Image: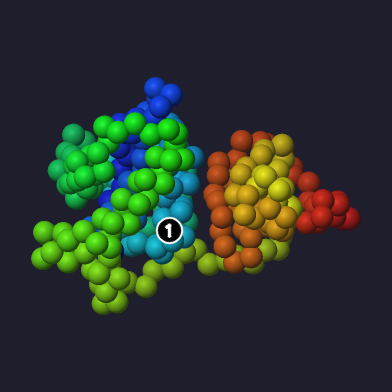
Amino acid sequence: MELWQLDTVGGFLLADGTTAKALTGVDDHSRFCISARLMARERTQSVCDGFSSALRTYGVPAQVLTDNGKVFTGRFAQPPVEVLFDRICRENGVDHLLTEPRSPTTTGKIERFHKTLRVEFDTRQVFRNLKTAQEALDEWVNYYNKQRPHQSLADATPESRFNAGTDRPQHRLTPRPERNGEQWVCRKVARNGIVSVGYQQVSVGKNFGGSACDVLVTDGLLQFWVGNELLKTVVRTSKGDVRKLHADGTAVRR
């Protein structure tokens, strides 16, 4: 059964005196790094954007294992709530496992990855900005996955184990739903990558500028689709009805 371990780690130094954190993730079986996404602050949306990106890139695991941090789960809130990370897991059929409180050894493989990251990537260095830090981190992760022998894998690379066909079950992302009914609206992605829905502006990426974007609107979430690709799931902050528009911005006659 495919399992990912995810966590956050801080200490990435920037020239302006601030520090960044990263959402990290490794495949339990192969130690393959499926996420090393930097963020200026540890926020629910940043963590979920990184998780969604890993799902789009590598497919959907059967399970994910995290600690009990508020960005990952609301099960221990009073009263318990379903946070966005939990909801993404539920909607994609991922079993979200939690560590026992004060038991970091449960996520030992991601903790070991953090130790390797700090030593080999050298998190004491200072980066000009978040972009240059991410570029350097991406380069190191590429080396870690594809070239670095791993002792626990009999000196094989994580990529060779991760891509072995017999080792990886064929899970897939949530299939594209039928886009009809009152919950769907259409918008055109602005040149800067922004989509506006009910006074809420969400960035789906500049590379989608000019594209028609289908948006699923529920009481709590917005899902943004271009073609067959689910770009982003975000918490809905606006209330009330959302106007239906054609992709060119003209109103739909009812």
Residue type (three-letter) at the residue carrying disc 1: Leu
Helix, strand or loop at mark 1: helix
Question: Within 10 Å of the Cα at label 1, are there few (<14), some (14-19), or many (20+) other Cα atoms?
Answer: some
| x, y percent for residue 33 | 30, 55
Q: Is residue 18 above or below residue 42?
A: above
Quarter-wise, where is residue 170 in the image? bottom left
Q: Which residue appears at 36% of the width and 40% of the height?
A: 22
Q: Is residue 116 left or right of residue 96?
A: left
Q: Is residue 188 left or right of residue 161?
A: right
Q: Residue furthest right?
A: 253
| x, y percent for residue 158 | 24, 62
Q: Is residue 158 above or below residue 115?
A: below
Q: Is residue 70 above or below residue 192?
A: above
Q: Which residue appears at 40% of the width and 27% of the height?
A: 15
Q: Which residue appears at 39% of the width and 63% of the height?
A: 58
| Number of marks in the rendered image | 1
The residue that label 1 is drawn on is 55
Report the front residue among 87 and 143.
143
Q: What quarter of the picture does the C terminus occupy?
A: bottom right
Report the front residue among 18 and 111.
18
Q: Residue furthest top?
A: 17
| x, y percent for residue 191 | 71, 48
Using the rendered image of the protein, determine whether residue 196 is visible from the camera's viewpoint: yes
Q: What quarter of the picture does the N terminus occupy?
A: bottom left
Quarter-wise, where is residue 159 in the image? bottom left
Query: How is the rendered protein coloured?
Result: rainbow
Using the rendered image of the protein, determine whether residue 73 is visible from the camera's viewpoint: no
Quarter-wise, where is residue 241 in the image? top right
Report the front residue among 190 and 214.
190
Q: Which residue appears at 70% of the width and 43% of the height?
A: 196
Q: Is residue 10 above or below residue 206?
A: above
